[in-house]
Amino acid sequence: LHLSDLHLDMSEAHLERLIASVQGLAHDVCVLTGDFRFRTFGPYAPALQALARLRPHLGEAVYAVLGNHDTIRMVPGMEALGIGVLMNESVRIERSEAALTLVGIDDAHYYRTHNFHKAAADVAADACAILLSHTPEPFRHAAHADFSLMLSGHTHGGQICLPGGIPILTDSDAPRALARGPWQHHGMAGYTSVGCGSSIDDVR
């Protein structure tokens, strides 16, 4: 289960709709690709309180990366909820005799604190590695590093689009073709979530 751009403190109605959407979904692992609060500044406690209400519906294994709306001060509260926050780190997930590695990089859009070398330091060369990145912007670097799959968000799929779903604004340096849904770059598959919430204005 991949959720992105939750902007949990946007409104009570948004949170209730989000909880209703994920209730009962069958999944092995949940990954969250950043932007937990609505604004880029100010109090973060409301976002954590909303995340605490959502957390019981996300299953046992939940991993996350931070986005450009988030602050590092949220990490202790998130980890207290049983969410593994990957800040240029990796975690190996095993099922029977199979395994894959989740690698999370810190925000590459605004803070630019992503570090591929550190994040993938413990990843075996032949591992099936999935990269969690708030934004699709570092896709070239990710493909060069031989990731199998890159999951990201940030763009909101344009949030407001032209007819046919053509995004107008993506707030991203990545090509517009990477703003929503599945894509491919060389040998790496990618998927950019259109996000759950809204940014700046409560409108989609």
Image (cartoon, rainbow, N blue to C red):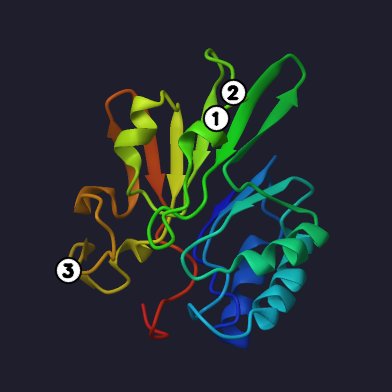
Asked if residue 112 lies left or right of residue 86, the reply is left
What kind of residue is marked 1?
Ala
Secondary structure under the numbered disc 1 in the rendered image: loop
Whether pointer 2 and pointer 1 mark residues with C-beta atoms closer than 8 Å, the reply is yes
Q: Which mark is residue 50?
A: none
- For this rendering, which residue is in front, 150 or 109? 109
Q: Which mark is residue 120?
A: 1
Which quadrant of the figure contains the C terminus? bottom left
Earlier sequence position, callout 3 versus callout 1 = 1
* Count of numbered circles in the view: 3
Residue 57: x and y in percent read 74, 61
Q: Residues within 10 Å of mark 2 (few under 14, many from 20)?
A: some
The structure residue drawn at horizontal position 41% and vertical position 53%, both measured from the top left corner, is 108
Q: Which picture quadrant has residue 23? A: bottom right
What kind of residue is marked 3?
Pro
The structure residue drawn at horizontal position 29% and vertical position 54%, both measured from the top left corner, is 179
Q: Which mark is residue 123?
A: 2
What kind of residue is marked 2?
Val
- Tell me: residue 47, above or below residue 177: below
Q: Which residue is mark 3?
A: 163
Q: Residues within 10 Å of mark 3 (few under 14, many from 20)?
A: few
- For this rendering, which residue is in front, 88 or 174? 88
Asked if residue 111 lies left or right of residue 88, the reply is left
Between circles 3 and 1, the one closer to the viewer is 1
